[in-house]
Amino acid sequence: MNAPVDAADDPAGRIVLLTTSHRVAPGLLSWQAWQALRGADEVLCADPAHPQLPYLKEAGVEVVVAAPTARDLVDRCVGGGRTVVVLTTAEGDRRLTDGLATLAGSGREQMPALELLPGSYDLPGARLLDLVQVMDRIRRECPWSRLRTHEDLAKYAIEEAYELVEAIETDDREELREELGDVLLQVVFHARIAEEAGGEDEPFSIDDVAGGIVDKLIHRHPHVFGDESAATPEEVREIWLRKKGEAKRRASVTDGVPLGQPGLALAAKLGSRVRTAALDVEVPRGEGVGYELLALALRAEAEGSTPRRRCGLPPAPTGMPCARRKGFRLRVTRPRHPPAPPARATRPRGRGALPGAALVVAGRAVPRAPGRAKPASVPRAAPTEGLSGGSGGIRATCAVLC
């Protein structure tokens, strides 16, 4: 039996509901929690597999595995001035708290003092641990997920990034939160796959990924974590580029530029690298729209603008598809019976095309509601509902509407 508290302090006794978080290492409890446990007349726990039990036993705290009702707890305390600690999870025990509230609200019961004591609690970011655990179980038990490879998931990373940009550009806070979660899922999924690497590939985990970016951020922010100082964004950029150069030690200014990105973005990125390095590189010249677009992209990047603005068109958020900006409704539907191609129709081809799909564009404007309301939309009856309008072939098809 644990050392009893002084009954004179609370003649009616005391019930302490001690909550703990499974996201905190077992045994790491607050000082107040240890005081309550060591001073209690009785410690109860309904879960025989509670992660804290082995550590409490090692510390000399006797725990009785039992699931008392609210009536039982009151009877254990009242009369003898006893203190009973009930060990629960971070979510508490709804059945027990509701029962105690009912007894206290009746006005006919002598009630002991009731105390809710957090023994351990979550720090910011604790739910990331849940995500890692959930992803681990899905990888082990889901027939689809356990077969996925990095190559299988690559397309989803691009799609989720487009949807995140779309949520930002439409100023949709709810969508922004959801799409950030979808992007985070890609990171955790890839990291979980990487744990199973074999052969010449060295495995790594989500902890390695997080540790790497933490080290990088600290290294590139010596004005925050070190002795350097930076008073302006320009000074911060200079420090960032210098620290990045020290770490990468690239042989060419084009090293590290992903060649799979869209053409105009690639041209602008290459132009940025050349301009940052102060290199005198002549722009390739020739006949055709390709050379014109290249020159336009480089000129726009140098001026901190976009090719669209250089053409004298109204400015638009980066990546915003023209069809949505003009209020067009865009939908892809699968016909029940494949129709013969219309004489003047052009079937979508390339990355955005769907087999047997017909592109349906209602060429009437959809009025934009005031404030942050989204444009009116069609019912989700089509296979492309929910796709980001800024992605791949769909965006290219929208562009012809301009």
Image (tube, rainbow, N blue to C red):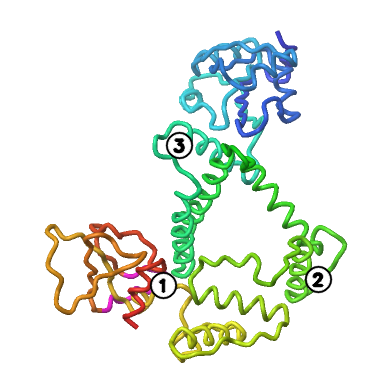
- Which residues are drawn in magenta? 365-375
Nearer to us: label 3 or label 2: 3
Toward the viewer: 368 or 346?
346
The correct choice, above or below, for 53 with respect to 24 in the image is above
Rendering quarter of residue 334: bottom left
Identified at 48% across, 76% down, the residue is 317
Nearer to us: label 2 or label 1: 2
The correct choice, above or below, for 396 with respect to 29 in the image is below
The secondary structure making up most of the magenta span is loop
Nearer to us: label 3 or label 1: 3
The percent position of residue 112, horizontal first and vertical second, equals: 60, 20
Residue type at mark 1 is Gly
Q: Earlier in the sequence, mark 3 or mark 2?
A: 3
The percent position of residue 342, horizontal first and vertical second, equals: 14, 74
Q: Which residue is mark 2?
A: 230
Task: Assess whether mark 1 and mark 2 are in contact (beta carbons under 8 angstroms).
Answer: no
Toward the viewer: 295 or 287?
287
Q: Which residue is mark 3?
A: 146
Q: CA distance from mark 3 to mark 2?
A: 47 Å
> Is residue 6 among what the camera can see?
no
Residue type at mark 2 is Ala
The percent position of residue 237, horizontal first and vertical second, equals: 73, 72
Residue type at mark 3 is Arg
Q: Which residue is mark 1?
A: 371
Q: Residues within 10 Å of mark 3 (few under 14, many from 20)?
A: some
Residue 367 is one of the magenta-drawn residues = yes
